[in-house]
Amino acid sequence: MLFHTGRKNARKGLNIVIVGCGKIGSILTEKLYKEGHDVTVVDTKSERLQSMAEQYDIMEVEGNGASFQVQKEAGVENADLFIAVTDKDELNLLCCTVAHFNGKCAAIARVRTPEYSEEVGFLKSKLDLAMVINPEQQTAHEIARILSLPEALGVNSFARGSVEMVRFKIPEGSILDGKTLIQLGSYSDNDVLICAVERDQEIFIPGGRFVLRSGDVVSFIATMPDARRFFGWIGIRTFAVRKAMIVGGGKTSYYLSRLLIENGIGVKIIEKEISRCDELGELLPQAEIICGDGTNAEVLAEEEIGQADAFIPLTGLDEENIMLTLYAADVSDAKVITKIQRRTFHNVISRLQLGSIIYPREITAEAIVAFVRGMTASRDNDNIETLYHMFDNRVEAVEFSVRAESKATGVMLKDLELRDNTLVACIIREGQSRIPRGQDVIRTGDNVVVVTTHMGLHVLDDILK
Amino acid sequence: MNIAIVLYTLGSVLEITGGLLLLPALIALIYGESTLLVFVLTAAGSFAAGWLLHRRRPNNMTFYVKEGFVTTALSWLMISLVGCLPFYFSGAIPSFTNALFETISGFTTTGASILNEVEALPVSCLFWRSFSHWIGGMGVLVFLLAIIPISGGSQMNLMKAESPGPSVGKFVPKVMATARILYLIYFGMTLTELCFLILGGMPFLEALMITFGTAGTGGFGVRSSSIGGYSPYIQWVVAVFMLLFGVNFNFYYFILLKRARAAFKMEEVRAYLVMVAAACLMIFLNLHHQMQGMEGILRHSFFQVASLVTSTGYATVDFDQWPGFSKMVLILLMFVGACAGSTGGGLKVQRILLLFKSYLRQMQMFLHPRAVRRIKYDGKSVSDEMAASVQTYLTAFLLFFGVSLVLVSLEGKDPVTNFTAVLTTINNMGPGLNLVGPAKNFDCMSTLSKYVLMFDMLAGRLELYPLLLLFHPALWKETAQKQARLRRKNNDR
């Protein structure tokens, strides 16, 4: 063929209608388009549609996504999936309800107001939604997870937290420097598997003879206790976060504070607007709410930024968040987490000392992409439970729940012909996770975590050559 | 400008042209004509040149508007140059200018000919001439988009540059699928007409060539008398299909989706049909004193109206002999042209509608200066930019028309000939009036005029902007500066 086509294009794409192309809508469009689906975007703002259409091969429809006629024009009748991600919860729910009258598509709505998010189960069943997404809540969960292992740059959990993918940077002079993975296995009796290594912008899915160096960014998979023990063994300072300082009192702050308070971590929120401070005080009686400008060094000093174990700026501006973490890293030893919305300047940002970086948009998009891949694979086949894109979208970690016999099941792993740069990282059976060895076998009913540089795994068999 | 991507795409276009040239070669083989060698060699040369350009995939595969325009303009120049070689080398059309004129006229679906004796041409050349109408009708780049997957959304800029009409949209999210649907409709309708013509007793190859001429709204006949020498049945079939190919293809897509009501609600299609009916009636009333036989008058007026409104240019009679009123109606129809998103030429009914609505709004504004009124089209508000862009297009069109007219007048023919020659080429019609009337041809024009008219044909088919941008000095100045900067950078290294 004259132009290259990827393996993923072999499958027929789904018809997907997305209402609202704000921050979440645009990243969903990008990801789903790149997965090979037919995407139609509905929005009331023609300029936004225009800029989307210039970047991606999609169809754009101008209008109110909750209107029956507009939905008809967007082809909801023949759509497989309908996603409503405008900035209004009520509108999103209405869009999905109307969509059900228009066709038989699965519907996903963004619902992020705390009042509604407590009733997610009710909404899902009564309005027949396939999924409810709450980016702020998902972001809060991710931040809380990192705070439970503050030594790590990033923590992603699989199988409802029974096993974690942990990312960290090997410090100068670490005992890991110069060791091969085989040596590592013989030194330590920890159940830890190194899945991916980034060195000088390059990604490796390492084999046994791979030599680690200080400065490498390493992702490994392990249970939470094993990960802690591993960090202790390689001599990385471990500590528990007891006091966290959050700047900005938005929805993410609220969700995060609730999680932290549940885990017994003290929370201090600095918020500018007095009215919002009142609301937060009402909602979070255990948290300390400070009314002040969190971007002011005086305010931060007065509130003793140096005493906090974790510092998390959650303002709406990327620039502010970046400046604040840089400042915090300078004046305290706190664990810093930077929330960034825009990916555009990723290259520049990754060179700064920003601690753990969180991209809320990516988190939501990954959840939906995982769901859509599950839809694409035939019904009774394996389902994708979780999906993470790591290392700047160059590595994918996928958790399959294996439902049926296939070529990859019932065979010892050492006898499977895996594709290059693909690794079976973990098998979770009856709630017990284990790092697989060559003799292990994948069975139906298992959950399997696969790490690969090939994007677009849909079913477990895709790991085979 | 990203020259690499332009050349790369031109490479694919040349490869495709090479492939298309094999069809007339096949005809030459079947008929045992000596043109076989010429066609095969041209095909091979075109393919080889395309392959050379296409070897290296550029790093940046994005088409911005300017790359889309330049690629489109250059592609059309290129296929015209390659396409004229068989005529020239086989000796079928000995003069290069004439061969180029005939080819451009073919690809742009104009159908203006320089041939005095059509029947004298080898069958394979006749076929290639008609086939070029079919290719040019829907467009080479749309064909390219239908068969070659290009990633990213920017290739829409290619389709926008090539497809006629002020607002080119998609049927389905993917450009490739849209282009395929377009070609599917095009192919299906072509096949239907072919069947109808064969049912009327026309030989297969002749029916095929006439169908190509109708489908692309081109108008190259295979006889000097155009469609005049055929039976009334054939004339009716051709007239009806000309009209159908002039309808916006969105209409057929709605029909395919079984949404007939939405199809017939399209304002443009309604206006188009009403306009055709009104023109027929006027010409019918104007003619029926002078000629005998109701059916004949009706058929001739309908045929000529359908032919000129869709910019096909077939004729059943020499309408140059008609009374002044009828000729005037036909000239006005030439200006309006067919629907946007069809294979026809002209200003397009959609633009005329928008212009008319802008005019009405302006009148309203004089009466009620504070009134807030939006222009509505198909029940939707039209943005002011859209309305303004249509007005700009009309201005550009008239300016272009005026300059061409002055240049053509230099050779000293009468005003009617000059005016209709420019009109008929810029709107991709075919025949004009007087010296370039339906019974005559363009061979009488001077070489300069021929080149001006060729330019008009290309500009008309691509709706001015791509070609005008190609010759816009600023574009090349910027590109040259960019290249120089790159070279300096490389040298420094």
Image (cartoon, coloured by chain):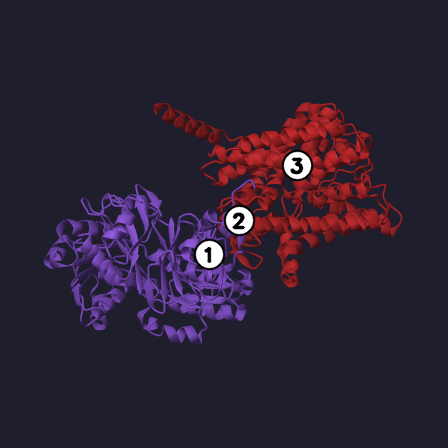
Chain colours: A purple, B red
Residue highlighted by disc 3:
B19
Label 3, label 2: how many angstroms apart (C-alpha)?
41 Å
Q: Please tell me which of labels 2 and 1 falls first in the chain.
A: 1
Residue B370 marker: 1
Give the amino acid type for the residue marked by disc 2 in the picture: Ala
Using residue A302 as the reference point, say whether residue B241 is left or right of it.
right
Neighbours of disc 3 within 10 Å: few (<14), some (14-19), many (20+): some
Q: Secondary structure at mark 2?
A: helix
Q: Please tell me which of labels 3 and 2 falls first in the chain.
A: 3
Q: Please tell me which of labels 3 and 1 falls first in the chain.
A: 3
Residue B423 appears in the picture as rendered: no
> B118 or A185: nearer the eye?
A185
- Residue positioned most to the right: B292
Location of residue B153 in the rendering, given as x and y in whole percent from the top left corner: 49, 47
Label 3, label 1: how many angstroms apart (C-alpha)?
60 Å
Label 2, label 1: how many angstroms apart (C-alpha)?
19 Å
Residue B387 marker: 2
